[in-house]
Amino acid sequence: MTEMTLIEAIRQAMDEEMARDPNVFIVGEDVGIRGGVFRATVGLFDKYGADRVIDSPLAELSIVGVGIGAALYGMKPICEIQFSDFIYPAYNQIISEAAKMCYRSNGEWTVPMVIRAPYGGGIGGGLYHSQSPEAMFAQVPGLKVVIPSNPYDAKGLLKSAVRDPNPVIFFEPKKGYRLIKGEVPEGEFTVPIGPARISRAGTDVSVFAYGMMHYYALQAAEKVAAEGISVEVVDLRTLYPVDRETILASVQRTGKALIVHEANLTGGYGAEVAATIAEGAFTDLDAPVRRLCGPDVPGVPFSHPLQDWFMPNPEKISSAIRELARY
Amino acid sequence: MTEMTLIEAIRQAMDEEMARDPNVFIVGEDVGIRGGVFRATVGLFDKYGADRVIDSPLAELSIVGVGIGAALYGMKPICEIQFSDFIYPAYNQIISEAAKMCYRSNGEWTVPMVIRAPYGGGIGGGLYHSQSPEAMFAQVPGLKVVIPSNPYDAKGLLKSAVRDPNPVIFFEPKKGYRLIKGEVPEGEFTVPIGPARISRAGTDVSVFAYGMMHYYALQAAEKVAAEGISVEVVDLRTLYPVDRETILASVQRTGKALIVHEANLTGGYGAEVAATIAEGAFTDLDAPVRRLCGPDVPGVPFSHPLQDWFMPNPEKISSAIRELARY
Amino acid sequence: MELTKEQRIEMYWMMLLARRLDERAWVLHRQGKIAFHISGIGQEAAQVGAAFALNRGEDWVTPYYRDLALMICLGYTPREFVLSLMGKQGEPSSGGRQMPSHWSLRRANAVSHSAPVATQACHAAGIALAMKMQKKDQVVLTTIGEGSTSQGEWYEAVNWAAVHQLPVIFLVENNQYAISVPQEKQMAVRSSADKACGLGLEGLTVDGTDPYKVYEVVARAAEKARSGNGPTVIEARMYRITPHSSDDDDRTYRSREEVEEHKQRDPILVVRSRLEQEGLLTPEQVEGMEARAREMVDDAVQFATQAPYPNVEEGTYPVYAEEVRHD
Amino acid sequence: MELTKEQRIEMYWMMLLARRLDERAWVLHRQGKIAFHISGIGQEAAQVGAAFALNRGEDWVTPYYRDLALMICLGYTPREFVLSLMGKQGEPSSGGRQMPSHWSLRRANAVSHSAPVATQACHAAGIALAMKMQKKDQVVLTTIGEGSTSQGEWYEAVNWAAVHQLPVIFLVENNQYAISVPQEKQMAVRSSADKACGLGLEGLTVDGTDPYKVYEVVARAAEKARSGNGPTVIEARMYRITPHSSDDDDRTYRSREEVEEHKQRDPILVVRSRLEQEGLLTPEQVEGMEARAREMVDDAVQFATQAPYPNVEEGTYPVYAEEVRHD
Ligand SMILES: Cc1ncc(C[n+]2csc(CCOP(=O)(O)OP(=O)(O)O)c2C)c(N)n1
Ligand SMILES: Cc1ncc(C[n+]2csc(CCOP(=O)(O)OP(=O)(O)O)c2C)c(N)n1
Ligand SMILES: [Mg+2]
Ligand SMILES: [Mg+2]
């Protein structure tokens, strides 16, 4: 076991997968000699060369489009989008091509690729370096959408993503890159794409979260535990396909559900979680489903007080848990 | 009053608004001499000239991007995207620019524009001429998303959209273009963007739908009425911002909610409606919220039996209503 | 690289077979036996010329919807084509999921494409990148209409290929229209091959009604690509003799005289009379070919008419690679 | 069009003021008083040259983040700039919503831009289209980095302008890097101005360290645009003297010698010594300018330091134009 940061775990996963499989390569902006603007690919250019760690032109559409082409040929591209805020130019290639290729060709062609993108706010990034666009992808059959919340999962899930025969969108909570540390075992392991994880067992309220908000949810759960509220925290991890079973089983236990994410409330991923619960746990619910999310404004503002206003945090989560527990 | 088709109402709205305001212009592929591939703009090129009905290059990104520029200058572009399936190349301009311009500039700049796009399946269009991407937009603060279900609303809402100082995404149920007919009064009227509409009052089950599915929902309601089930049908019309009040008031009356759309179930617009109900009508619900939607496959298949399998229709809606009524 | 007499005759045969098949599709449409057809009539010469310049079965192709003749050269059979027209089971491009003429033929390295134009260009660049990485002696041919070169996607693909000196041939089939929109509304240059100079690669314009000339330039470009000297843009000039598709009415935007004039220069007629004049084909041989084509087309229609539709259950998969069925 | 002596001195003053302000931003960052700075150091000459070629206040600009000197020429004040660095109330570009250097200045016809690069190019084309429709005697200048011309968005914008002969000037500030990525990984041509030939418009390359030369070519392009002769692409060559931003460490990808070499040719030094040699500026005048700049920068820092942060409530609006507050 070694303690490492989230971003170290991500780097290690890529390094190991590149060593394991010569078809794996990285493509994106500044991923080469610079090692990525967040330093996720540091050292890989020196180790694997310019052919396998490619500094692309500044154009996300073709980072993904060229990646798809290479994947069709049998390669395993890991496409880095520098910030998830800049993924939209590639939206057509992701939605129209990567996601639909297998189905539309009746399985003749598949697109084994990973698209990595740092997401999330609270880092002084303003409207365009703070976005959480997961709900724009976690509604698209053919894609898998994964968001890790800790180094162990990050490494294991990214390795699974690289080996997955489908396009996997891998959003990384950038605020946690260096903040979130954790034990990661030496040697080979993977974490399967699909199942959510109960990261803390509890009986009074279920909290569903992922990424940075899961990290905060655990803190909030700890805090209210001292007040006698027993919180079950579920790390959704794989957002799409949805692990409805784990979600419903947790609500069956607690009868109360709080969903937390940074993205705007309306139409966010929490809507699907809430809908799932409303449909599948109707008779188990002891209180209305509650969502604690980013407010419905176009982005996280830059100015500090406004950013704080926007972002969910352990305090806001604790209050929401308390309210729900009281219901 | 004149009876007209949905597409005639749309054309008339554009014609009247262009006559009223010299700043209104149309831009898109084949909108000029051809009058649009669905013939929505027929006659307008002859009437208003090539300067105001512009055949763009075949590039959606710049149809919208150039439209935004013109809107910033004070014009009122109506951008036609030939099929909603082809809106993704313009996603970056819509999400990053049109939607965020007002907020990010603290109101110094606004983008008064309309983006029209035919959507929906059941017309033998296969994966790429049948899509319903509304949920990818009805989660984006700064946008308004409108879907009319009948000629009266189509005309009145489109006129409101043209006059709206914000970017409005106007999805048109293409299967209904000529199929859906209705009375439209002579002379000036508008329908406000925002409120949903109770298109049929009832007491047993609420059905929430829009566009073509609303048309089918009314047929289903009629059918089950004969069996003694009283259905309230709500035409959501404006999907974003969400008219939560009308939705909740209806569930308060009936205690049961069915949501119908063509788009994939998971992460579709119905998730937000279901979440809204789960949060706001918890004590009113007599049955789990139910969604009847397109299955979670990447698109509507071309082959007829497969298309029929995919599409919701009055029969499927009737069955779902019956089940819910029985609960 | 010099074509043999046999090859030149074979090329005419491929053009002819594609033409007769295409004409039959229009008949089937008029008879109400199929719902949609999009035609390659007038474009066969360039497609066959390009196909013969490839190492077929080894080289890769990312085609577009008008490429019936190209696909026939790659081994796509008339039976397969009519299955696709009718959305019948066993159709190899998509198993009836896609509209007709949305090709895919894994066994021939012809990649599945979608309806959104220009997406295939990036795939070609990515495939070529993979070939270069794997040091394969292969090239990729990608085709597109001249209107679709207005898409930023095409620009990005060509730019990638130029920067990385990839073995791709970008063949633009300039048939002078994009639905109703003439070339001069798409671009301010005289040929889309002129766009190459702005991206630092070679661009050539060729008479696309002459299969042997097209063969020559494509063969030269392929040789160049194989020897590591990078990509080429080739515009083949031709005329779209039919309406855009069976949904179009081209009388609304171009004169009958213009169309008639081009019908006089129909490549099928021109090539046949050339081969006759050169003594390579006797009128009897021509008649023999016509009879053989008729027979194959008849057989294909009969075969496809009797073929079953897909089972409804086939609509449910394969959304993910794990669900691909190998039968 | 000939510059007067006063204008030439005024241009140097603008360069100097922008430079001193920019340098202070780096100091503030080192002092921990601001969180982020992205610098225009080394690019002032081209920006000032271009600004002076415009009819400022009448013509329009869609700028990009390095354009501090350009914005200063348009009347953006040092106080306003430091407010934006600190995210303080009253900041005119965004009211503290956007990161610093994301300009907007309605009173100067300088349009709000976002972080996703290249989106502003289409806006410029759209503004120019509107100017042409309204027969205005105006032009639009849009700026961009050379790396960002790899985006399909830029291509589509330039293509629109060329097809419609719009009054736009596309100024590329080629500072030789896109973060860490050098020009040769972005494009296979020697200048981004070469891209113009592929789109049928004029392209010019100019020494971007000489404000008077840049003035000349931009003035000529503006005149051409005003007389209805369409757009021009101008690449101004320069060097990014600082790291990409305060988050960057450029030592990882370029040598100190290279940077030193360019510092020797710093446009501020070159222009000053030229003006001194020509007898237009005495050492005393230069000292006077420096003192004035220092005073203005000091004042701006003091002013902004004392200014309040936005009220939290300001984060909630204006999502829609209806919510714009006029105070
Ligand atoms: C992204 C996208 N936008 C619009 C369309 C609708 N559309 C289909 S074909 C076509 C015209 C294509 O013209 P061109 O590229 O010249 O090819 P051609 O059909 O003439 O061979 C259009 C606009 C589409 N398929 N994809
Ligand atoms: C669409 C998009 N992708 C990525 C980025 C991240 N990014 C910010 S600046 C930059 C480099 C820009 O280089 P260039 O266009 O040459 O302008 P410069 O910064 O050199 O002036 C990158 C990659 C972005 N802002 N937008
Ligand atoms: Mg064409
Ligand atoms: Mg640069």
Image (tube, coloured by chain):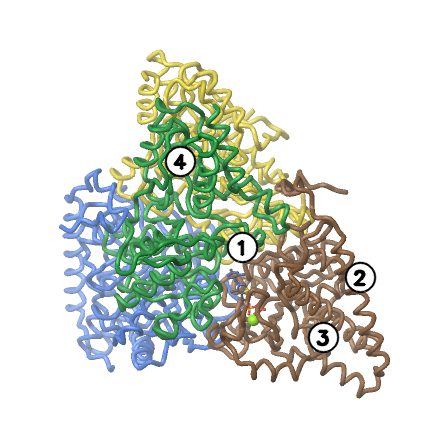
Chain colours: A yellow, B green, C brown, D blue
* Residue that badge 3 annotates: C215
Q: Which chain carries label 2?
A: C
Question: Which three-letter amino acid code belongs to the residue tagged 3?
Answer: Tyr
**Chain letter belonging to callout 3:** C
Cβ–Cβ below 8 Å for labels 3 and 4? no
Query: Considering the numbered disc 2 on the image, is that residue within a helix, a strand or a loop?
Result: helix
Disc 3 with disc 2 on a shared chain: yes
Q: Residue C175 carries which label?
A: none
The answer to whether tags 3 and 1 share a subunit is no
Say which element carries label 3. Answer: helix
The chain containing the residue under callout 4 comes to B
Q: What element carries label 1?
A: loop
Q: Can residue D53 be seen in this view?
A: yes
Amino acid type at image mark 1: His
Q: Which residue is disc 4 drawn over?
A: B273
Q: In this view, does C316 lie to the left or right of A93?
A: right
Front disc: 4 or 2: 2
Comparing labels 3 and 4, the label whose residue is closer to the camera = 4
Foreground residue, C228 or A211?
A: A211
Q: Could you tell me the amino acid type at mark 4?
A: Val
Q: Quadrant of the N terminus of chain B?
A: bottom left
Residue type at mark 2: give it: Asp
The x and y percentages for residue C104 are 68, 56
For marks 3 and 2, give the CA distance: 30 Å
Q: Mark 1 = which residue? A: B129
* Residue B53: image location, x then y, percent: 38, 70
Residue identifier under label 2: C299
Most extreme residue toward the top, as rendered? A228
Q: Earlier in the sequence, mark 4 or mark 1?
A: 1
The picture quadrant where one finds residue A158 is top right
Q: Do the residues labelled 3 and 2 touch (CB within 8 Å)?
A: no
In front: B43, or B230?
B230
